[in-house]
C-alpha cells in the first residue's frame, strides 16, 4: 500500500517549524509499524511554493528548507532498509514562472528557452476556455510584458505550461527522470498527466502522445526494471485506459472514478454506485493496477459524477459552501467530512482495502486528522501531522509555519501517541486493516465480484485470486441490517467492526455502518505494488 505525504508537513527535524528530510527519516519506524511499503513524496524541489511545490524552479535539487540532497539520500536509504519504496511526485506539465527557463524565455523570445513554453501574440482561443481553478484563476492565457506575448497555463498564471511538442523539453523531462532514478528512487507519481500530453479541448499536444509515455517508461525501467509509475488521470474510464498502454506505460492510475462513486455510495447509503463503478472500469493489462484512495492532498474532486450525483454528495459531506472548492470538490479531510463519526471512517477504510487495487492513504487520515476551513483553497487539508498532545504536536519544537486544526481536532485530542496506547483506536484499526490486506493476495490483485444479498444498503462482494478469496459485507446505512451471505466452508472472519455479529453460518447482523470480511484459505503473501 502507498502512503502519500508531504515532507513539509510531516516532521520538523531542526526546530524551524518546517518539516524536513531528517525529520522524515526519523519517522520511518512509524511507517513500518503502520504497514506502509511504499511512500509517495509530494514535490520537495526548490519552489516559491505558491502551489505547495507543484510550481518547481529546479527539478534536480531539494528545497533547502527541507534539507540537502544528502539528507534526501539518507531518507531513501533508511526507507529501503525498512522495505519501503519511494515514489517521487513530479509536475512536468508546467514550471514555476520563476524557473530560470521561463525567466530566459521572457527576456529573449529568440532564446531556445522561449520555445520551452506555449506562446501566442494574441490568444488563439478565448482566454479562459477551461479553468481548473475557477474562482482562483481567471484565464488560461496571460500576458507577459517582458516578451509582449501571451503564455498558456492549464493551472494558475504563475505556472506556465511546458511545450511538450518541443523535443528539447521532452529531453529535459527524460533527463530529470534519469537523474532521480539513478539516485535510487523506485518510481514516480506523474502529476496532471492528461494535460501534459492532451489538452482539455482533446487536442493532442504531441502527434503520438503515448509514444512519449512509453519512452518515459523505458527510460526509467532501463535503469530500474522494477520501478513503478503512478499517474494522476482524473478522467472517465474510457479516457483512463489508454494511459496503461499495452502494459508499457503507467503501472498504476489513481482511480478517481471509483473514489467518486464510493463517496456517492456513502452519501446515498446505497451499494449500487460502488458496484456499478467497478463494473464500468475497463479490463487492464497484466502488471498494471488501480491505485484506489479515499482522500489526497487536493480537494475531493467529484468531476466524475453527474451534477445531480455531485449535489447529493455535497449535501451529505459538504453542506456549507465554504467546504467546497472549484465548483467540483470538497476541501475537507476524511474524518470531519464523515462528520467525525468514527464508525463511518473505519468503514471507509474497510471499503478501500477490500476493493482490488493498491490502496493509497493520505498522511494523517489514519488518525482522523482534521482540517482548517479558514485556510484558502486546498490548504485546508494540508495541516501538519499530529504526533503528540504537546504544543507543536510533536511535529516541531518551534511555532509551526502552518497552523493545526483547533477544537475537537486539535493535537490535544487527535495524535499518534494517544492512539498508539489505545488498542481500540482508529490508528490501530487502520494498522490491522493493512495487515489483513497485505496477507491476502486477493485483496490487491483479485477479481471483483458483487453479490446480491437483497438489501440495497449492503455492499456484498468477493475478490478472488486463484485459491485466495476474500468476502466482504458493508452496511452503508445508519441502521442495523440482517442479511444472508454464503461463503466457502473454510472461510474465517478476518476483520469486522466491534458490533457486527455472525448470528448463524452465513447469517450476519450488521451494525449501522458495520462491515465484516472473511478469507479462505489464509495464504500469507506479500503485495507486489
Ligand atoms: C495536480 C496536483 C495539484 C496541483 C496541480 C498542478 O492536480 O495534485 O495539487 O495543484 O496538479 O500541479
Ligand atoms: Ca525543519
Image (tube, rainbow, N blue to C red):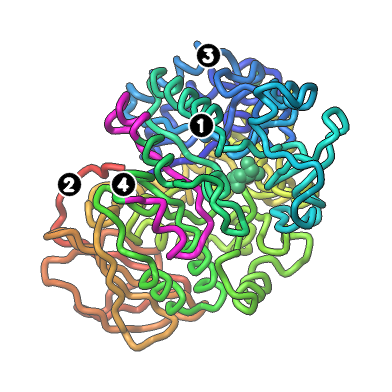
Label placed on residue 453: none
In which image quadrant can residue 177 be found?
Answer: top left
493 inside magenta stretch: no
Residue reaching furthest right?
A: 145
Label placed on residue 524: 2
Q: Is residue 392 above or below residue 452?
A: above
Query: Does the residue at mark 1 contact the one at mark 2 (Cβ under 8 Å)?
Result: no
Q: Is residue 197 above or below residue 98?
A: below
For marks 1 and 2, the one nearer the N-term is 1
> Where's ligand 2: which quadrant?
top right
Residue at 80 percent of width and 41 percent of height: 121
Residue beneath label 3, please? 69
For marks 2 and 3, the one nearer the N-term is 3
Residue beneath label 4, please? 435
Residue at 34 percent of width and 88 percent of height: 454
Q: Which residue is nearer to you in this view: 191 or 80?
A: 191
Q: Secondary structure at mark 4?
A: helix
Please state if 510 lies on the left or on the right of 222 as rendered. right
**Distance between the Cα atoms at labels 1 and 2?**
43 Å
Residue 494 is situated, as x and y percent measured from the top left of the image, at 26, 59
Quadrant, the C terminus:
top left
The segment highlighted magenta reads 218-245
Residue 273 is situated, as x and y percent measured from the top left of the image, at 46, 76
Is there any visible trace of residue 390 in the rendered image?
Answer: no
**Distance between the Cα atoms at labels 2 and 3?**
38 Å
Residue at 30 percent of width and 78 percent of height: 508
Residue beneath label 1, please? 170
Residue 186 is situated, as x and y percent measured from the top left of the image, at 37, 30
Query: Does the residue at mark 4 contact the one at mark 1 (Cβ under 8 Å)?
Result: no
**Distance between the Cα atoms at labels 2 and 4?**
11 Å
Label 2 beta carbon less than 8 Å to ligand 1 = no
**Distance between the Cα atoms at labels 3 and 4?**
33 Å
Amino acid at each position: 500500500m502507498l502512503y502519500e505525504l508531504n515532507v513539509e508537513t510531516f516532521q520538523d527535524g531542526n526546530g524551524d517549524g518546517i518539516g524536513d528530510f531528517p525529520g522524515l527519516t526519523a519517522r520511518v519506524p512509524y511507517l513500518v509499524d503502520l504497514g506502509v511499503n511504499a511512500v509517495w513524496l509530494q514535490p520537495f524541489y526548490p519552489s516559491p511554493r505558491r502551489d505547495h511545490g507543484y510550481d518547481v524552479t529546479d527539478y534536480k535539487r531539494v528545497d533547502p528548507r527541507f534539507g540537502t540532497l544528502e539528507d534526501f539520500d539518507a531518507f531513501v536509504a533508511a526507507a529501503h532498509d525498512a522495505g519501503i519504496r519511494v515514489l517521487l511526485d513530479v509536475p512536468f506539465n508546467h514550471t514555476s514562472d520563476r524557473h530560470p527557463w521561463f525567466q530566459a524565455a521572457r527576456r529573449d523570445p529568440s532564446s531556445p528557452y522561449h520555445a520551452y513554453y506555449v506562446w501566442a501574440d494574441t490568444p488563439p482561443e478565448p482566454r479562459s476556455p477551461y479553468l481548473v481553478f475557477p474562482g482562483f484563476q481567471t484565464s488560461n492565457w496571460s500576458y507577459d510584458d517582458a516578451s509582449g506575448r501571451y503564455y498558456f497555463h492549464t493551472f494558475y498564471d504563475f505556472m506556465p505550461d511546458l511545450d511538450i511538442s518541443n523535443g528539447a523539453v521532452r529531453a529535459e523531462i527524460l533527463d530529470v527522470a534519469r537523474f532521480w532514478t539513478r539516485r535510487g528512487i523506485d518510481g514516480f507519481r506523474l502529476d496532471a498527466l492528461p494535460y501534459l500530453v492532451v489538452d482539455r479541448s482533446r487536442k493532442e499536444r504531441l502527434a503520438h502522445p503515448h509514444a512519449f509515455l512509453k519512452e518515459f517508461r523505458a527510460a526509467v525501467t532501463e535503469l530500474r526494471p522494477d520501478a513503478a509509475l503512478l499517474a494522476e488521470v482524473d478522467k472517465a474510464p474510457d479516457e483512463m485506459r489508454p494511459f496503461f498502454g499495452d502494459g508499457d506505460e503507467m503501472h498504476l492510475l489513481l482511480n478517481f472514478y471509483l473514489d467518486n462513486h464510493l463517496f456517492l455510495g456513502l452519501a446515498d447509503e446505497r451499494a449500487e454506485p460502488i458496484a456499478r463503478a467497478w463494473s464500468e472500469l475497463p479490463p487492464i493489462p497484466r502488471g498494471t493496477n488501480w491505485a484506489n484512495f479515499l482522500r489526497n492532498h487536493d480537494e475531493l474532486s467529484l468531476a466524475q459524477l453527474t451534477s445531480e450525483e455531485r449535489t447529493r454528495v455535497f449535501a451529505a459531506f459538504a453542506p456549507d459552501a465554504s467546504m467546497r472548492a472549484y465548483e467540483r470538490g470538497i476541501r475537507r479531510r476524511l474524518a470531519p467530512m464523515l462528520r467525525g463519526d468514527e464508525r463511518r471512517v473505519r468503514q471507509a477504510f474497510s471499503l478501500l482495502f477490500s476493493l482490488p487495487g493498491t490502496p493509497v492513504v493520505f498522511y494523517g487520515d489514519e488518525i482522523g486528522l482534521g482540517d482548517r476551513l479558514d485556510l484558502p483553497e486546498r490548504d485546508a487539508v494540508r495541516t501538519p501531522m499530529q504526533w503528540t498532545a504537546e504544543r507543536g504536536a510533536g511535529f516541531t519544537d518551534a511555532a509551526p509555519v502552518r497552523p493545526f486544526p483547533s477544537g475537537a481536532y486539535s493535537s490535544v485530542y487527535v495524535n499518534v501517541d494517544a492512539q498508539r496506547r489505545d488498542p481500540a483506536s482508529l490508528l490501530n484499526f487502520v494498522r490491522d486493516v493493512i495487515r489483513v490486506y497485505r496477507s491476502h493476495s486477493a485483496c490487491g490483485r483479485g477479481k471483483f465480484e458483487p453479490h446480491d444479498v437483497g438489501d440495497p444498503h449492503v455492499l456484498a462482494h468477493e475478490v478472488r485470486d486463484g485459491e485466495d478469496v476474500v468476502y466482504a459485507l458493508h452496511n452503508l446505512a445508519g441502521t442495523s441490517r440482517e442479511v444472508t451471505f454464503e461463503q466457502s466452508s473454510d472461510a474465517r472472519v478476518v476483520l469486522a467492526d466491534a458490533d457486527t455479529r455472525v448470528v448463524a453460518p452465513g447469517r450476519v447482523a450488521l451494525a449501522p455502518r458495520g462491515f465484516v470480511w472473511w478469507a479462505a484459505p489464509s495464504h500469507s503473501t506479500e503485495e507486489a505494488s
